[in-house]
Amino acid sequence: MNDFILSLLCLAATLALYFANKRLYRRRRSLLLMPLVLTPMILVLLLVVTHISYRDYMGETHWLLWLLGPATIAFAVPVYENLHIIRRHWLSLSAGVATAVCVAVYSSVWLARLLTLPEEVQRSLAVRSITTPFALEAAKQMGGQPDLVALFVVITGVFGMAVGDILFLRLSVRSRLAKGAGLGASSHGAGTARAYEMGQEEGVVSSLVMMLAGIITVLAAPLIGLWMC
């Protein structure tokens, strides 16, 4: 089969599976039925069964990854519409974001070194807690591997979204601000989607924290890279 046609079929399959999965998730809210969980699992299975290589799959689907950039920027719209929330809590949010970035990077690198993982894996893990566009940019400056970065970001997002509600319940977290900030700082886009399901305030705070954490990490990436040497 022509490579171009194969790539187009992969693109069509990806979009069809995603929208079908999204419709299913609206009917039944379950972690295993989330588009971020179920769709990749089905796609991987299809690629394995049909013996389609990763390179062929990415031929015409790479622009979907590019769209993550505009999608992330779009989160700024609800933030702008709810600036009163940001003005009221700017100090606690700023301190929380700075702390979250430091803890996320340090804990990831510490665990990777404890497990004696390769240097490239360590540098890829260091940016796992920020959303993909920011993580890929930071990884470039630090010497991380793009495919590993994307994988670690997705795993972190899904895990954070899955255990977020449980942690809030166990720790008796009732503040909408705290819930939104926690999800945005720890599980970026996936967590922000969950935050919007909780409520508008949680979603707005999560969006802001996610973007700030990404910007800070990208700006600090050269310093983080030097620290890891």
Image: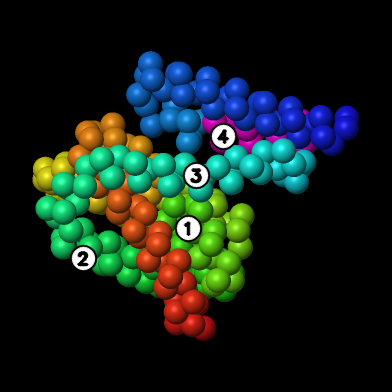
What mark, if any, has residue 134 been given in the picture? Answer: 1
The residues bearing labels 4 and 1 have C-alpha atoms spaced at a distance of: 24 Å
Which residue is labeled 2 in the image? Answer: 95
> Alpha carbon of mark 4 to alpha carbon of mark 3: how far?
25 Å
Q: Quarter holding the N terminus?
A: top right
**Gap in Å between the C-alphas at discs 2 and 1?**
20 Å
Residue contact between numbered discs 2 and 1, judged by CB atoms under 8 Å: no
Q: Amino acid at mark 4?
A: Met
Q: Is residue 45 magenta?
A: yes
Gap in angstroms between the C-alphas marked 3 and 1: 12 Å
Residue 165 x %, y %:
24, 40
Cα gap from disc 2 to disc 3, whole angstroms? 27 Å
Label 3, on which residue?
70
* SS of the residue under disc 2: helix
Q: Between residues 57 and 97, which one lies in front from this camera angle?
A: 97
The correct choice, above or below, for 190 with respect to 197 in the image is below
Q: Which residues are magenta?
A: 39-52
Q: Position of residue 172 (x, y in %)?
A: 11, 45
Would residue 63 be visible to someone looking at this image?
yes
Residue at 51% over, 48% down: 69
* Crowd tier of the residue under label 3, counting other residues whose Cα lies within 10 Å: few below 14, some 14–19, many 20 or above: few
Considering only order in the chain, which callout, 3 or 2, is on the residue closer to the N terminus? 3
Of badges 4 and 3, nearer the viewer stands 3
Of the numbered discs in the image, which one, if any, rests on residue 224? none
